[in-house]
Image (cartoon, rainbow, N blue to C red):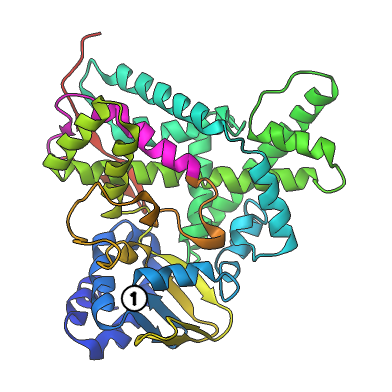
Amino acid sequence: MTTLHDIWSGIVGRERNLHAEFLNLRELVDLRFENLLAKPMLVRPLFSTLRHIKPIFTAPHLAAVSLYPDVKEVLSNSEAFSVVEIYAKKMEATTGVFVLGMADTPQYKHEIGLMRKAMHPCDLDLIRQFVAETSQEIIEEAAPQGRLDAVGQLSRVVPTRLLKTYFGTPGPDEVTMMHWMRSIFREIFLNLGNDPRMTEEATRDARLLTDYLNSLIAQRKAEMASGQTLPDNFLCRLLFLQRDSPETIADETIRRILGGTIVGTVDTHSKAIAHALDQLLNRPISLEEAQAVARKDDDDQFAHYVFEALRFNPQNPFLIRHCEKDTVIAQGTERETTIKAGSIVLVGTESAMFDPAVFPEPDAFHPTRPLENYLHFGHGQHTCFGKSIAEVLIPGVLKPLLKLEGLRRASNEELDYDGAFPGKMIVEFTPLSE
């Protein structure tokens, strides 16, 4: 099989090879997709070449879009470029049917409506406070040693604890929840080659998660029936909605909503936090500036530093869609192209964030770019449901860490991966007295 190195080397300056080499990439997407996502610097040169040579690339059963307006156009057209073929079957086999794998159907509208009703405007302030306090507690525990695993002790832990406090799903314990969330997420979103070992592990963990959530829902409903005061969290709000409209909201609906929502919470946030930190550590001047902003508690400007850092290594370099019908994109431009029905479409969200028409001097670190231009959470119908939470959580976890003096990588330590997931990143800082 052609190696990734051969692909990147072979395409540069050779438009005639794009067709064959991109088909090789299609094979790698199927067989090694998870490892590919752990190395976005391998993906970026390919999409950079596409932006300059063939912004909308097509081949039999495959297409790729690389410019900002075309990426947004594809993601905005969920009727033509669907998620159903990509995710629905594996979601149904694990967490159950979930909005992220649905077309714009009445069921989708009903269930996304329930999810939105279960989130209240005041929640973001509470989440911000919880994240700040939890992150600070973790950092203070490590402060005397002056050393911390920014992934294992921080970026995975805070979102997992948010499952308990905000979503109302603490799980049997934190370690078990982390394991369930990762194996199920891996099966749904990363196992494009259908590795039977991944499927077996996820199937087992999905059964355990389903049993746990069913038991938890039954427990909360019994408490409600007995007149007990329920905690104010996402689960209990869904149960109150069910109480007011039992004919339209089944227990199974609540369980599916919960399962799909929490599986997408832990590792996506953890990866974004780790990647943003990693990129700041690569840039001493920007790191120093971000630390100064953090110490001033300028949360708005600090978020600009975090999401600009994440642009250089986002949690996903591209999204995948399935073309349902022949569809023309970039109509009226010189790059106007028809994407054929049945094509798998690689939607280059990272590439779009390097489009100089929207991100001037794209290779430079500029923390003044408009936050609304970033595509870290997708676009269109399937924009990440937790986008508003992520915009609070990701910088909120990093802020107390960046306030520390002498923050740096530990000697000979780089960001280590478990497949596509950050596994460990040891940082050091000036120890604080107890």
Residue in view at x 48 percent, y 60 percent: 379
Whether residue 269 can be seen here? yes
| Residue placed under numbered mark 1 in the picture | 25
**327 and 143: which is toward the camera:** 327
> Is 330 drawn above or below residue 142 in the view shown?
below
At which x and y percent is residue 404? Answer: 21, 24
Q: Residues within 10 Å of mark 1 (few under 14, many from 20)?
A: many
Residue in view at x 29 percent, y 72 percent: 47
Horizontally, residue 188 falls left or right of residue 281, namely right
Q: Which image quadrant is residue 90 in? A: bottom right
Horizontally, residue 91 falls left or right of residue 71, namely right
Callout 1, which amino acid? Leu
On whether residue 97 falls in the magenta region, the answer is: no
Residue in view at x 23 percent, y 76 percent: 49
At which x and y percent is residue 108? Answer: 69, 58
Horizontally, residue 243 falls left or right of residue 288, namely right
Range of residues picked out in magenta: 388-412
